[in-house]
Amino acid sequence: MLPATRPLLAYGQGRSYGDSCLNDGGTLLRTAGLDRFISLDDATGVLRCEAGITLGEILRLTVPRGLFLPVVPGTKYVSVGGAIANDIHGKNHHRKGTFGAHVRRLELLRSDGQRQQIGPGDPLFAATIAGLGLTGLITWAEIELSRISIAAIRAEAIPFAGLDEFLALSDESDAQFEYTVAWLDVFSRAQRGIFFRGDHAQGSPSAPRIRTSVPVDVPLVNGATVRAFNAAYRAAQKVGGRSRLQHWDPFLFPLDGVGRWNRLYGRRGFLQFQCVVPTREALAELLRDPPPSPLTVLKRFGGTKSPGLMSFPRPGFTLTFDLPNHGEETFARFARLEKIAIEAGGALYPAKDACMSRESFERSFPLLPEFARHLDPAFSSSFWRRVTR
Amino acid sequence: MLGATSAIAQAAARVWAERGEELVLVGRDPEKLAAVADDLRTRGGQVETVVQDLTEDQAPLVERLGAADVTLIAHGVFGDAQRRDVDPDYAESVLRTNLIAPVRILTLLAPRLQRGACIAALSSVAGDRGRAKVGVYGASKAGLDSFLSGLRQRLQPAGVRVLTLKPGFVDTPLTANLPKNPLFASAAQIGSGIVQAVDSRRDGIVYLPWWWRLIMLVVKALPERIFKKLSF
């Protein structure tokens, strides 16, 4: 039985960028102690583990056995429970869909003390995948891993200019490569960027270099530094060569190489805007007057349907901007982008959100009324209260 | 591994399991023990479990453990602060678990150990000097320290190493109710420190992390008339 005098919410690694992992005035259930493996079947590649374990811990165990997580986000420091509750996606969405599509079974502890084992086909399962932790506490999950020949990545970095070239590269690459994603220099008028694509490959590149870490809050991210960084980053990718054999870690999790990188945004931190829009026109509109973001990431989602009622990925283009938090000014920029995305029939991503309106939330997730039927009455989050009040 | 479901023991066990070692886990709670065993098996360990309350008849257990290469003694209770200071039976139960049980087990085990074997026992910085905040817990660890020191001398000729492991503040269920500060270490950190100490072929007293040795030097050096007025 869970204590239920105040609203409850599971808290894994706290890597959501907004308030979906917070519970102001309520109780957070820290899941870091739920970090045990339960079983790994080498023959079928099925892993069962507790929900607090991180994706990095899983990869450390499974990579030497030739098994990889089918879907990973941009950082390995997220918990399995968080990956399910946000139904995360990665650079291979066009091939593998979302994380939730590879969950075979999970156990949900409801606040009435009931433990329910659920899987694909169960309505409660569909509500729990991408359910933002609001259907109860996920205690363990069973995940189907992918078999890989070897842990290296054959990676290519291709410079491009403009959305036409991005689209042509997406068409070509999504058909051939497991991982595709593009980085955009918002300061270049010609919309220059780098298209990254990669596949698991033979070879044994050295493991990532020693982690560096940002020791204190130093607000280094501003217009001038971002402009310089973007130009330097583009140049570096060209020098690096078009094709190289890389360790999977820096290819899939480039930011994990710098501990506490968020400190570069200073004490007030940063906000991320991530949306998906169905059309090229909407994407062009979002990029017409882009904010000065150092990490502008663009990817075309595939057509695989997510199992979760509240899943964010859907066919179209997903675009993210990272911006230092300058209060009202930043919120105003986000509001403008939000309007464009929602009016184009797009959606905003709760895991990254700090400011979307109730209306935008409802328009992003048309199955919201069905989802609401499966809420655990004792669970809530700051995000949920914000977008439903 | 005695008290194998403790967070620190689990952390050390994970390192050993990943090396493919054979582990015997001893603990009270069969369900928890099974979960820990599954985890360690998945990580590559060969695992057996023994359900036993370590304050009860230890002879059959010691019989079963036989001559292990490494014996990790990791069970312990912190005790509820309020009860510990007013309820003599409760205070005694802390001593039974943290001090009497290891003394009984090691007394039975010592003659069975072979040259090269290692006893690694979890004590605490709390054993270095009694404080109001730790009460009889500190006394139990001070007693354990003293016993291990004697045992180390006694087993030295037999080539058996005795390690006294002294973690500082560790973020585990034992300290779940304490407010956390920057001195807290993770169980994983302490676990790998234990494995390192066992691997190093050293014996003696190991602080985890090492800088607790310096802190405790200062704490031990404070004159009593000052120390008694402090509230840390």
Image (cartoon, coloured by chain):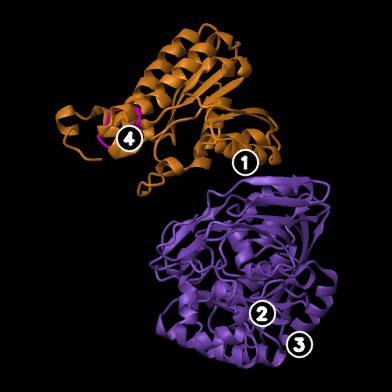
Q: Tell which subunit mark 1 falls on.
A: B
Instruction: Tell me the kind of residue under disc 1.
Output: Ala
Can you tell which mark lies on residue B215?
4
Q: Nearer the viewer, mark 1 or mark 2?
A: 1
Q: Which residue is mark 2?
A: A318
Residue at 46 percent of width and 88 percent of height? A332
Circle 3: element type: helix
Can you tell which mark lies on residue B35?
1
Q: For chain A, what colour was chosen?
A: purple
Instruction: Tell me the kind of residue under disc 2.
Output: Thr
| Disc 4 and disc 2 on one polypeptide chain | no
Q: How far is mark 4 from mark 3, CA to CA?
A: 63 Å
Disc 4 crowd, CA 10 A, few/some/many (<14, 14-19, 20+): few
Q: Tell which subunit mark 4 falls on.
A: B
Q: Nearer the viewer, mark 2 or mark 3?
A: 2
Q: Which residue is mark 3?
A: A164
Circle 4: element type: helix
Disc 3 crowd, CA 10 A, few/some/many (<14, 14-19, 20+): few
Instruction: Tell me the kind of residue under disc 3.
Output: Asp
| Disc 1 and disc 2 on one polypeptide chain | no
**Magenta extent:** B126-134
Q: How far is mark 4 from mark 2, CA to CA?
A: 52 Å
**Does the rendering let one see residue B67?**
no
Q: For chain B, what colour was chosen?
A: orange
Looking at the image, is mark 4 or mark 1 earlier in the sequence?
A: 1
Left/right placement of residue A364 relative to residue A41 reads left
Q: Is residue A120 above or below residue A333?
A: above
Instruction: Give the x, y percent position of residue B111.
Output: 55, 8
| Disc 2 and disc 3 on one polypeptide chain | yes
Can you tell which mark lies on residue A86?
none
Q: Is residue B157 above or below residue A82?
A: above
